[in-house]
Structures are given as structure tokens and as C-alpha cells.
Image (cartoon, rainbow, N blue to C red):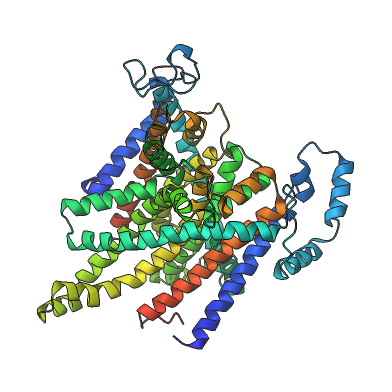
Amino acid sequence: MRDLLRHPTGLAGAILLAVVLLAALFGSFLAPHDPQLFHPATRLQGPSASFWLGTDQFGRDLFSRILNGARTTVAFGVSATLLGVGFGAMIGITAGVVGGWIDSLIMRLVDGLLAVPDLLFTLLIVTVLGGGAGHALLAVAVAFTPGMARISRSAVLSVRTREFVQAAVARGESRAYIIGAEVLPNALGPLIVEATIRVSFAIMLGATLGFLGLGAQPPSTEWGLMIAEARQYMFRNPWCVAAPGAAIAIAALGFNLFGDALRDLIDPRGRR
Amino acid sequence: MNAGYLARRLLSVLVVLWIVSATVFGITQILPGNAAVMILGEYATPDQLKALELQLGLDRPWWAQYLSWIQGILSGDWGISMRLSVPVSALIAEAFWRSLALAAAALVAVTLIAIPMGVVAAMKRGTWGDLVISLFAYLGTCVPEFVTATILLVFLAAPERQFFPAGGYTPPGESLPGFLYHMVLPALTLCLILTAHIARQVRSEMSDVLASDYIRAARLKGLSEFTVIRRHALRNAMAPAVAVISLDIGYLLGGIIVVEEVFAWPGLGRLMIYALQNRDLPVIQATTLVLAGVYALSNLISDIVIAALDPRVRYA
């Protein structure tokens, strides 16, 4: 951990991440105003002493809304990624461990699915499921699955031929033991790195879906949705769109920088 | 590059396309809430559903439906849009060229900006110019397209400034300057994001190459810095960069969907969002297939370019 903080990217990532996580955990207590309360007399105001980031088209306090939305956004990104990693790891590890034609079949399918860009894939799934935050979450998770399957499979393959796994096979350990106790812990590193970076993509995808009206629904304080709702008024008060936009960028940047630093730490050569 | 390699890659593109077609078909037809429900909505009566299912042939087994659908796609009959009552192929053809123009403009601009940027960052590694470029690159990967687009709109299309139109489209046949004028902001949005990504990649590849022994050898031979960079370093750094650019076409395709929507550019992305919002099934299927096909093809082309740039690559 100390090595991570000595790294300039790691430090920057950790700071941003800490801010975002604090906002996600305590944002609703710290918010100076009720995020849903209308202040009709002070609509579309710029930043002031009582409204730190200004107000939106209904006079709602932007700062409070952003603090409130942090939890939705972070929870969305983390749980979508965790679900995707879970699905993907199950598929990838199965493929890597079983091998043979099952492996080839699964990986051909995964390659085919990877040929559909993330956003396109997510949009398709949302169409089938219908919009809404829960469905958007599931869609992002499913869209992440093929990529995570590929990564966990290659992690498993790189571990599989190592001596300690062969030793376990020679000792006559059961397959479940070998996977659970020997392969998985050693294949975990790349998975964690990839997952951390993916959280930032999940946050951006979630915001994009919210923006397109296919994710969180009003009066949610989801940041993408905030931008979509304020778009008509953006020329009258740019803060309506700039503030949530910056919030999305900070959250995504935090996870991305932190993940990059983690990668450098685990594999100094593998920096891309 | 030999014919066998090409044939193998071409075959794999076909396999990928087949899988995508099966996925698109599967997602839109087999999952709960079949086409009839998607069209009529949740509140349709069972009789209405039954009638539409018969009309669409949804009562047949799924493989028969898939076969007739694929047959239609292959023979150019892409169905009729359910909302617009126009042949889907006509809609796609029109939208495709508009999207292609936008994507091409963005891609050309990106290549011209990002590669020199990355090279400079790698050569001046550790200076604050490098820092600015790296920072810009990080920001570019962490700001979603719709945010960039909205911010650009606020700065460049606000009513009191109006440097560029806030959205819309003029056919090039009607007025070429108008066409280009409308293209600036959407292309710029795509460009900003891709530049960030590609410059970062070129920088990292270039720094590796510049630290290698053959570059030291070329410098020791007394070649000028320009020759070292252009003849020796750039060529070796380009193959991975091309790989990234081709991956970025995936980003570009995703980005174009959002950007077209924000700027009301009537291309494939906007058509797709329209179809999604209106549950226009044949249009959803066609736009997805076309976008995935373009992506698969661009991957193929980039593999060929990489093989041509780097004789070591043969991908057995």
C-alpha cells in the first residue's frame, strides 16, 4: 500500500477515490440542502455562499444533488463490475480448467461477443430488459462478462502450467481443491486490476445510459440523468451540466488511476 | 503476408459475424418478452399478441425463424421499419454514409494529431509538456462522450457566441460548407476522446522503443535525430499503435452513437437510438449487425496493416 502511494498516479488516484468514496458513504449527511427541495425564487443560479455549485432548473441545490448521487453512481459502478467479474470469472475459469473443445467453443463465443462494442451491447440488453437503473446495471454486467472471461481464462492458463499446480496434481488433490486453493489465488491479481479499471467504465456507461434516458429515472440524482435533464437550460446556467460532468470525470478518473497504479505494482513490465 | 494467413483471418471474421448475428437474433427474439411484446408493449391483450405473432411468424420454431431472417439479411431484404414504414436497407444506406463521413473525419484528425503528440511526449519524457499530454490523455479516457459533447456545446454553440450550430445536418449535395460546418462539433468531440487514448498509447510504445539497443546503435552511427525517429523508432512503435487505433474503432462506434444523438446528426447511431426508444425491431437488428460488422472488418484491416508494418508478425 505504501508503494502504491509513493507512485504519483497511485497517490492521485487514491486521493480522488477517497473523495468519491467519502461522498458516497456520507454525502447525504454532508449535503447542505435537501437534494429534492425546490427553491423557485433561485432557479438556475451560479455558485453562491448558500448554493456552492449553484442551482438547477427547479432551484434545487446542485452541490447537494451531486453529493447525493455519489452513492448511486459508485454503487452502480462497483456492483455492475462485480457482477460482470463474477459471471466472467466463472466462464473463463471453467474454460481454462476444462480445456479441450469446450474451451475452444466458449472462447469462440466470447470472441464473437467481444466484437460488439460495450455501449452497443449494453444498449441491446437494455432494450430487451427495458430501461431503469436495475436493468442498466445488469446490462453493463453482462456486457463486461466476455472481456472478464477472456482475462480470467488467460490468468488461469498462465498459472496452470506452474510447478506448484503440477505438484498439487501429482499429490492427487481434487480438482476443486486445485482450482480453489492453488489456481484462483494466484490468478487473482490481473483480475483485480482489470476490475478496478472497469469500475470507471461502468460508471461512464451508467451515466451514458442515464443520459439517454435508459438508465436511472427522475427524480434520481444520478449524474448522467442530471445532465440530460439540465440540457435545455445549459446555456442559461452552465453549472447545471458542468458540475455533474466534473463529478463523473472525478469518479471515473479515481478508479482508473488507482487501477493503473495497481497494475504497475503487480506487474512493472505490463504497463500499457 | 501470405494467402493462407489472409484466408484464415477472413474466415474468423465470418465466424465472428455469424456469432454476432446469432446473438442479435437471440437477444431480440428468444429472450422473455418476444418481438410481439416488444412492439405492442406490456399492455397488449393476448389476442393482439397472438395475431401479431402469427403475422411475424413467431409461432414457428426458433431455428426456422433464424434461417429465414438470415436468408433475408443475405439477400438484401432487411425488412420494413415498424415505425417509419420504409425498407430498413434504405434507412441504413442513408445513415451509413453520414456516420462514415463523421467517423472518417474524426479518425483522420486523430491520427494527424495523436501520433505526433505521443512521439513528442515520449521524446520529452519527464518534462512538463509530457505531463500535460499524459494528463490530457487520462482526462480523455475518463470523461464520457456525452459530457465532452455537452461542454463543447456550452462553450462553442451558446446563443451569444454561436461559433458552430448546436446540432442538425445539411446534406453535402445542398451545401458543402453547411455540411462541414455541422460536422465540426461532433467530429471534435470524437476527436478529443480518441486523441487522448491514442496519444497515450503511442507515447508508451515510443518510450519503450527509444530505450532499446537498436536506437542507441542508430544514434551512435551518427544518424540525425529525425532519421532515428522516423526510420527506426516510429516504424517499430507503429504496429502496436495501429492495433490500438483499431481497438479504438470500437470506442469510436460506441462514441458515435452518443455523439450523433447529442448533436442530432442523422447517422447510424441516431437511427439506432431512435429504434431502441421506439422498439423498432428490424432497425435495431440491422444497425447492430452493421456496426458489429464494421468493427470486425476494421479489426481485420488493422491485422493486415500490422503484418505489413512488422514482418515478424504472422500470427500462426
Percent from the top left, x then y, of residue B283?
A: 68, 54
At horizontal 38% and vertical 29% (from top left) the residue drawn is A239
Q: Is residue A181 left or right of residue B279?
A: left
Q: Is residue B8 left or right of residue A257?
A: right
Percent from the top left, x then y, of residue A224?
A: 48, 36
Q: Is residue A92 left or right of residue A266?
A: right
Between A64 and A74, the one lying in front of the other is: A64
Q: Is residue A159 left or right of residue B294?
A: left
The N terminus of chain B, quarter of image:
bottom left
At horizontal 79% and vertical 48% (from top left) the residue drawn is B36
Percent from the top left, x then y, of residue A122?
A: 57, 50
Is residue A172 among the parts visible in the rendering?
A: no
* Residue furthest to the front: B174
Between B262 and A147, the one lying in front of the other is: B262
Between B169 and B261, the one lying in front of the other is: B169
Above-or-below relation of A8 to A68: below
* Residue B110 sits in quarter: bottom left
Callout count: 0
Above-or-below relation of B53 to A157: above
Is residue A163 among the parts visible in the rendering?
A: yes
At horizontal 17% and vertical 72% (from top left) the residue drawn is B226
* Residue B119 sits in quarter: bottom left
Percent from the top left, x then y, of residue B22?
A: 68, 63
